[in-house]
Amino acid sequence: MSLSKSKPKSKASPSAAAALTESAPSPSSVQDASTQDAPLDVTQAHHEGDITPDELSFVHDAVLLQETVAAVLGVKSLPKQTDDNTHAGLQMSGVYVDATFGRGGHSRLLLSQLADDAQLIVFDKDPTAISVAQELASTDSRVKVVHDSFATLTDSLAAMGIVQVDGLMADLGISSPQIDDGSRGFSFMRDGAVDMRMDTSRGQSVAEWLMKVDDETLANVLYDFGEERHSRRIARAIKQMESYESTLELAEVIKVAHPNWQRGKHPATQSFQAMRIFINNELGDVDAFLEQSIPILKSGGQLAVISFHSLEDRRIKQFLQRHSKGQYPEDEKLPMPPNRPRYFSKPKRVGPNKAETSQNPRSRSAWLRMATRTDTDYEQATV
Ligand SMILES: C[S@@+](CC[C@H](N)C(=O)[O-])C[C@H]1O[C@@H](n2cnc3c(N)ncnc32)[C@H](O)[C@@H]1O
């Protein structure tokens, strides 16, 4: 679903999907891939509290939209919307969480299915996403906004007097607007500061981290979070740079150092992904969120999580296997817990259909995993 706001006309850039899937035309034209795109006109450094109308209007196409909202409500499908908008939706009561508001595609559809007495708590780390969420909250009193990581789920909800919820959804990773805005530093195709923080109000940027990190730690990050096989060589090249002021310069250095370009993929793809995941503690946050979903969800409550790469998807899959079937991965170093409570029903997995992947190529790598919380009481001591 696109938001009603239109894309700024001046941004003659390849689609956000292309940047997110980080495709480049071919190995022979890879030389041009990182520079083919003229810098956008929103290239000024991102100052906190200084959000331009352009930033607010970058568009994000919500992935697996109907499926995710149906999943979090615990229904097979949503009623068809009528053209004249007279359908009142499902009118579900309860408390729901959108852990990754973005531009609110999933939240808005969910709200259309909620009753007046329902509540929707939305989280995002990103100040621009939070501005959009606050705008929505100002016109819909069911919406409450948390500018923080979803890793703070329990504490943030407790601060609002909420102990348990009926549904939790998360659409992990970064949004198209974050990629489209070169000044955020996520893209190797648009120039900007080497920042990559989702939350620009706290923490260190990738540039600040690169100034301090040693070669070996950097190589490990590139390998662990980007599965980059040439991590050592690339880390050495990055550490030989004098400064880290431009994403295009950084991408160029990685490209030159990378010995094995793959067709249709920019050589900096995995390194950029790795640094982004590291600087935002993305995997740690996902683990914390999943663990907290057990006590936070009511019996019969729904968990629905969309992921876009295997590092995340594997975690979600293994978490649900552990807590639905009592299955632990073989390489798990932890001792088996004496009892293996089944906190979730048999999980389900859904991917996008052909229509969605052709309309929104970014959805190609998406998986939605969902499960229902059982009535098994949560035991604090279990793994
Ligand atoms: C894929 S987008 C979500 C798009 C959203 N579903 C929509 O329809 O517009 C992911 C969003 O999650 C946010 N995010 C990622 N990790 C987060 C975390 N640990 N805590 C809070 N927000 C996070 C990002 O800033 C981004 O805005």
Image (cartoon, helix red, strand yellow):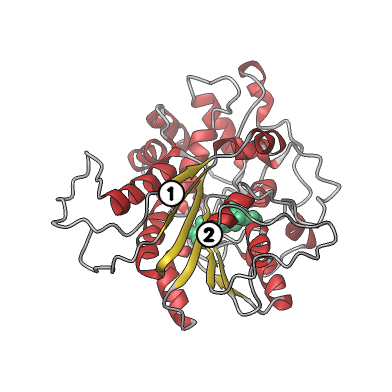
> Which of 44 and 336 lies nearest the eye of the viewer?
336
**Residue 119 left/right relative to 344:** right
| Residue type, mark 1 in image | Phe
Percent of width and height locating residue 160: 49, 82
Q: CA distance from mark 1 to mark 2?
A: 29 Å
As drawn, 245 above or below 258 = below
Q: Is there a contact, CB below 8 Å, between mark 1 and mark 2?
A: no
Front: mark 1 or 2: 2
Nearest the eye: 352 or 255: 352
Residue annotated with mark 1? 278
Ligand 1 is within 8 Å of the C-beta of the residue at disc 2: no
Q: Which residue is mark 2?
A: 72
Give the amino acid at mark 2: Val
Q: Quadrant of ligand 1?
A: bottom right
Q: Residue furthest bottom?
A: 161
Instruction: Describe the element under mark 1 as helix, strand or loop.
Output: helix
Place residue 292 in its image quadrant. bottom left
**Residue 245 x/y as whole percent:** 59, 46
